Image (cartoon, grey):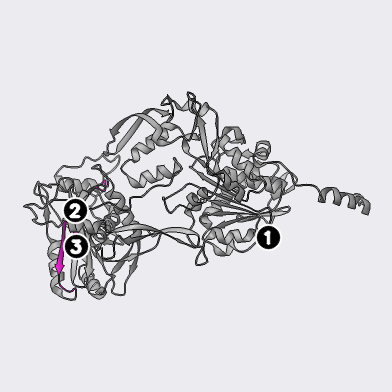
Amino acid sequence: MRQLKDKEQLHKITLTRGLKPLPKISVHKWADTYRQLSSGISAEPGKWKTSRTPYTAEPMEAVTQRGIHRIVLKWCAQAAKSEIMNNIIGRFAHVDPCTIMMIQPTIEMANDFSKMRISNMIRDTKVLTPLFFDLKDSAKTRDSNQTILSKVFPGGRLIFCGANSPAGLASRPVRILLCDEVDRFPKSASTEGDPIDIASKRMSTFWNYLLVMCSTPTIEGESRIDIEYMAGTQEEWRHRCPSCGEYHTLHYKQMISDYEEVKDNAGHKVIIVKSVLWRCPDCGHSFDELAIKSAPQKYFALNPDAAQNGIRSFYVNGFSSPWLTWSGIMREWLEAQGRPEREQVVMNTRFGLSYQMTGAFADEIQFLNRCEEYGAELPDGVLLLTAAVDVQDNRLEYEVCGWNENEECYGIVRGVITGQPDNSYVWRKLDEVLDRKYHLQNGNPLKVVRTFIDSGGHFTSEVYKYCKDGIYKQRIAIKGQGGAGVPLVSKVTLLKEGIPLQLLGVNEGKQQVFSRLGIKKVGAQYFHFPKDDEYLGLRGYDQIYFKQLIAEHKVAHKSGGQIYSMWEPVSKHARNESLDLRVYNLAVFKSCKPYINWAQLRENATGEVAVEEPLPEKTSKPKRTMIRSQGINIWS
């Protein structure tokens, strides 16, 4: 039988263990000694080696650096920033137990991170397994204290929260706070304020607290990680030039790509990159990827004094990642050119930079000058017509737009119908615009397939009546929704009048319109504008139209520690009807696009029969060409 220790022995153990100083092992040395990367999760499973990603060493060293309380990682994707947080969790759970909280953008992402990354790390890193599980007869038995969002270990606890869950953020004190992808955090956790500010208040009782924030950036002027990075030491990972010996941060503008551009069967641009060289901005010599990645590398701090405030910040882009190739990165960038949505993805996730969105233009003349001759009511390339109507107190304003499968947009006609909307006359005149046939150069006619009509003014009931009478013609009432994060085509509600009301995220729509206005190369998502001609006479695309089209710009505001942008008029009396109409037309197209048979539309417009692959088995009935949304056939 095991003999109990006497009081002298207990006193000795208490003194030797209780007064034992905190372990001095850093996070990166702990990881090199103990950490195992899990198969199926890591690209290179097995023993962790900091030497594989040398840029991770200094941030992990900073975790245990005296006087440092905030670490900011402004990094590209696929650069091991999540693994750094895993190593922090493992090190503290093993040798310096305390309460740790990890915040993900949503509670669903927190669940996934816990199950896919943390559980596997605990299983495969042997020094962690007995801390989180009871071991009986060499088999793991789950402790009742262990859940997906809360894991208890001797002397501490690991908690997972979503930034959208105020109760989870404010419920308990923590010493280590890890915030992943902070640029995807909501501006407010419900109505209680900035989620990071809420959670960081939980650390106020600890003298040795630590806040770590990681993220790829998003939009310039709105990116939280940009702001936090600038407040820190701004340490850039640089490579030494093999020729002149100067250290430089690798930048996409310094990359020289030898490539070939081809088109696939659908007409989309495909880039074949043959080689990529980096040109040194100092000496002008060029080197390939192997030479630069083999050269000495280290961090350079642009704002070293920030360390006195306890903040160190680090920047790494994809050109330094061992898992990303220069040719792959530049292929993504070259293929994204001219597509703002794709450009932003590459800029954020590969270059680790915030994306400068097109928000304002110097004047309207540049767009007036690019108006073109269509040679018919509808130019070649138009396959689908949409329309939008803005309801004012003394008039209706409308625009008809043409589209093709690449989201190339053609303004067809923009007009005004004067008269109060409570007069049936104005709605009859609108029917003349929407019901007529517009002809291509070959004589084939197209009709407007769907119309969105603004119902947010003083004549809501008149709009609802018109839409109810014309529901079979796809006259749809709409209402704009402000705020960030609302998709352009948002949810649909059913009104008591028995008709649908389509809600639109107008902020998202305006951003998309301005992004497309910034496209200068004819092709996908390009906006075409017509000159007046003999076919439709005055089409309405004059200087006043373009003034209204660019009548707003994005203005950054700060509230509750968060930066957010709002669309505001460029001047006090600026009118924006043309911008609203183009947003509505884009929304109409987006609502139709998932249901469109483009091959059939092209056949209808051009007379060219679409070639279809023969069915391997019995032929089904011919498929009818129709576009449906919420169960409504838009073809009359």
Estimate the x, y position of residue 601 in percent, counting from the top left.
20, 49
User: Element under label 1?
Assistant: loop
User: Element under label 2?
Assistant: strand
Q: Residue furthest top?
A: 243
Q: Are marks 1 and 2 in contact (CB under 8 Å)?
A: no
357 left or right, relative to 180: left
- Residue corresponding to mark 3: 398
Q: Earlier in the sequence, mark 1 or mark 2?
A: 1
- Residue corresponding to mark 2: 411
615 drawn magenta = no
Estimate the x, y position of residue 620 in percent, counting from the top left.
26, 47
Q: Are marks 3 and 2 in contact (CB under 8 Å)?
A: no
Q: Main secondary structure of the magenta part?
A: strand
On screen, 619 above or below 321? below
What's the CA distance linking mark 1 and mark 3? Answer: 61 Å
Q: Residue at x 68, y 41 (%)?
A: 26
- Disc assigned to residue 205: 1
First to last magenta residue range? 399-421
Q: In terms of depth relative to the viewer, which is nearer, 113 or 155?
A: 155
Q: Let me know if residue 309 appears in the view.
A: yes
How many residues crowd mark 3 within 10 Å: few (<14), some (14–19), many (20+)? many
Q: Which quadrant would residue 423 be assigned to in this image? A: bottom left
Q: Which quadrant would residue 388 be assigned to in this image? A: bottom left
User: Nearer the viewer's eye, disc 1 or disc 3?
Assistant: 1
Q: Which quadrant would residue 495 be assigned to in this image? A: bottom left
Q: Let me know if residue 117 appears in the view.
A: no
Q: Residue at x 57, y 62 (%)?
A: 198
Q: Label 3 is placed on what type of residue? A: Tyr
Q: Label 1 is placed on what type of residue? A: Thr
255 left or right, relative to 539: right
Q: In terms of depth relative to the viewer, which is nearer, 569 or 99?
A: 569
Q: Earlier in the sequence, mark 3 or mark 2?
A: 3
